Image: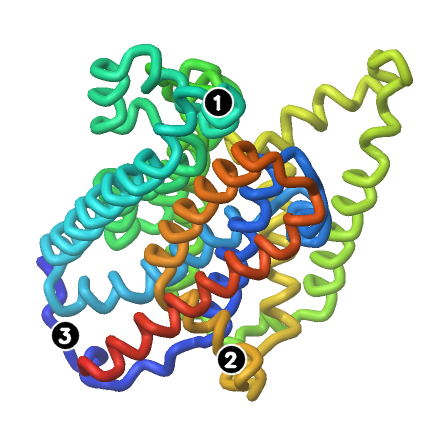
Amino acid sequence: MESTDTSPLKQPVQRDLRIDFFRGLALLMILIDHVENMLGVSLLSSFTLKGFGYCDAAEVFVFLSGYLYGIVYSRVYRQYGSLGCFKKSLHRGFGLYLATLLTLGCCLAISIPFAIENVQISKHLFLFPLLEAPVKSTAYLLNLFYTPYGFEILRFYILLFLFLSPALFWLFKRSVALACLVSFGIYSLSQFFDWSTIPMAYSQFGRFYFNPLSWQLLFFIGLVIGSKNYDKKSVLIYNAFLKYFALLIVLCAFYIDFIEPRLFSSNGIVKSPWFHLLASMQLKQTLGLFRLINFLALAYYVSSITSSMQPFWKSKLAFPLVVCGQHPLIVYCLGLVLLYLNVVLFNELSLGPKWILPFHFIGCGISISVALAVHQYYKLKN
């Protein structure tokens, strides 16, 4: 029988602006990392999260999305039950699919005319399937078995909201232990068995990047924390030993990441027998165990030293990032359009590295400005 207690829904919910701030920061980090990865340079990306260990902004975004899913859908569950959660999740999934197609159309309109003549653009953005077999690749594009560069995480979210999230949430509401066992079990299979990684029709990575069978665990952990509504008064959050142990893990990950290049000899032969084990545990494609532990330790430490009551989150300095985090889909899709525009301009005009910083400032400025405009629109509308 579904719960019909709606009294909690009548109480105002205090929005935790930390979540929006860190989501906004992660979105801008993703834009910077994408642009520099495509241009083959490492300037500001050396100072983003991926430069300090074995996790990056993608983990931040997925975990916080799961946390918010747990908060929001728990309230929906109390009012409308499982059916209401399924409907809301499916609606969100189809909305993401339509937004992905619209963004794809904009990105392809920007890049395809130039990629026909410029092989570097086609190579960087993984557009050659569309140029070599346009009809077949377009069909795969529509069913998400082929995506150009940058759209992998959107495909992951679509599958997550259409299938995995509602199923895991439904199971979680009936048996926490069973839901945890299923989620961890699926993750374990994806780590040890290659067949559990979804194959793709066209893929520059060989398999399904952001493998949903792996990444669902990070989303699920966030979902559990959000559903349980743990607050800053929790003994676990304030535990000094756990806080410094988490910091130690983060520092160890940073140190190992720093010395990892030295595990190779000058001729490319591996010096350390531990290297292959380490490499398999840090894969982003399947959210390797080392990446997962590194991120969870970082998230715990940041949570332990911050509070939602701190005035910084409501300050003018934090406000632009908070607003970006409140409109993540618009900001991310806009970031993809800016990425494709950057790649086209740099390759067509043969721009040098000195142009990267100005383009970063312009791109981040446009992202923030659009987020502020959307925020103001909704504020006036309501």
Residue 152, compared with residue 99, is above or below; it is above
Residue 197 percent location from the top left of the image: 42, 21
Q: Which mark is drawn over residue 5?
A: 3
Question: Is residue 189 visible to the viewer in this orientation of the structure?
Answer: no
Q: What residue type is labelled 1?
A: Asn
Residue drawn at x 38%, y 53% as measured from the top left:
334
Callout 3: SS: loop
Q: Which amino acid does label 3 sit on?
A: Asp
How far, Cα to Cα, is label 1 from label 3? 61 Å
Residue drawn at x 84%, y 12% as measured from the top left:
269
Q: How crowded is mark 3: few (under 14 residues within 10 Å), some or many (20 or more)?
A: few
Q: In which quarter of the image is residue 223?
A: bottom left
| Quadrant holding the C terminus | bottom left
How far, Cα to Cα, is label 2 from label 1? 49 Å
Asked whether the beta carbons under mark 2 and mark 1 sit within 8 Å of each other, the answer is no
Give whichever of 106, 197 is nearer the camera. 106
How far, Cα to Cα, is label 2 from label 3? 27 Å
Q: Earlier in the sequence, mark 2 or mark 1?
A: 1
- Residue furthest to the right: 266
Callout 2: SS: loop
Q: Earlier in the sequence, mark 1 or mark 3?
A: 3
Mark 2, residue position: 308
Residue 244, compared with residue 297, is above or below; it is below
Q: Which mark is drawn over residue 148?
A: none
Q: What residue type is labelled 2?
A: Ser
Callout 1: SS: loop
Mark 1, residue position: 118
Give whichever of 256, 81 is nearer the camera. 256
| Left or right of 226 in this view: 60 | right
Residue drawn at x 43%, y 55% as measured from the top left:
222
